[in-house]
Amino acid sequence: MDQFYQELRRVQKKERNNGTLARVEEDFYNKIHQYLDELKEEAMRDPFSNVSGMLKQAQIIATEICERREKKISEAAVVNIQRSYHLFTGKPQFDLVDTTPLNLTPEEEKFYFSLIDTLRNHRGNISLEKLSDDDNETEKIVKSKETQSNTLIPPAPEDKDDEVLKRLDEINKAEIITDDSQKPAEKEIPKTPVKKEVKPQVNSAIEDNPNVLDNQDEFFDFESKRVAKDTELVTMLVFDEVGPIVGVDEKVYGPFRPQDLVTLPLVNAKIFFKNRKGRQVKI
């Protein structure tokens, strides 16, 4: 366990001092997770050991290594795409220069090429060729709309004088009906009966208790209640000097000094009570 901690410190030092990526194994990130899990388990078994402090330091070192490597990979992708994709200098061309960073893990290699694809698509969207194509498409759409609007204009109507004269003759020859009895009878429109909305009768028992139709047996989650009780925070007065510990909620508490008032999970506090290193107080 201490050997891998020294390995983390070695990689951290190289990432700080060198502009290139430090050489690591392909399963480097998997080993980090495995190492941190082992430290957490050991700290849970013996909260008064110095493993809690080592866990906290290992988390800080691993985070710094990951962030420094991410920054180097991102900068390499940007420089590579700038060398490979020419903008605003005639017709854009994409000739990928093979400057892939060395010492990439499989996860980092996937991350690097995803950045290359994203930057390439971005440059393609803002290139002169793309913008000119968009202008041509817009002109085509406008021209097609103008042609379509012209073809939809109806032809000019022909001379309708003959049709109007025929219509006037028919009106003059029509008989004028003055008797109301001779008027055509108006058809009665049958009225459609309106259906009354029948409200469904709701059982009063269901209204009072919506769960009355639930046939499933009720159960009591004892496990959730136990976990909630174990992670309950209590206030404790510390008697002796104790190093940092990892609580059941995987948070680091401490270090502790005599006469300190601290808040921590009940399960961890019981260890202090049992070893007479503290007692619970109510505020």
Image (cartoon, rainbow, N blue to C red):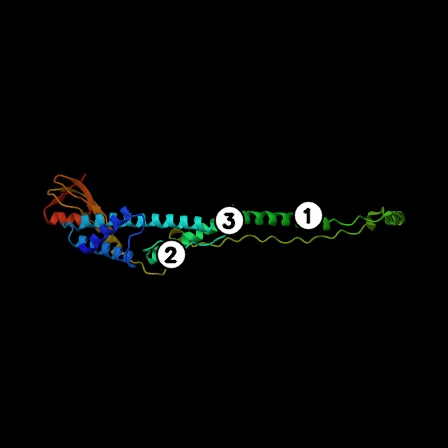
Cα separation between marks 2 and 1: 49 Å
Distance from disc 2 to disc 3, alpha carbons, whole Å, reads 23 Å
Q: Quadrant of residue 31?
A: bottom left
Q: Secondary structure at mark 3?
A: helix
Q: Nearer the viewer, mark 2 or mark 1?
A: 2
Which is more toward the observer, 165 or 151? Answer: 151
Q: Secondary structure at mark 2?
A: helix
Image x and y of residue 158, in percent? 83, 49
Q: Quadrant of residue 102?
A: bottom left
Residue 96 drawn above or below residue 255: below
Which one is nearer the viewer's eye here, 4 or 212?
4
**How many residues crowd mark 1 within 10 Å: few (<14), some (14–19), many (20+)?**
few
Residue type marked 3: Asn
Q: Quadrant of the N terminus?
A: bottom left
Residue 146 - label: 1
Q: Is residue 121 left or right of residue 61?
A: right
Badge 3 is on which residue?
125
Asked if one can make out residue 275 in the rendered structure from this viewpoint, the answer is yes
* Foreground label between 3 and 1: 3
What residue type is disc 1 on? Glu
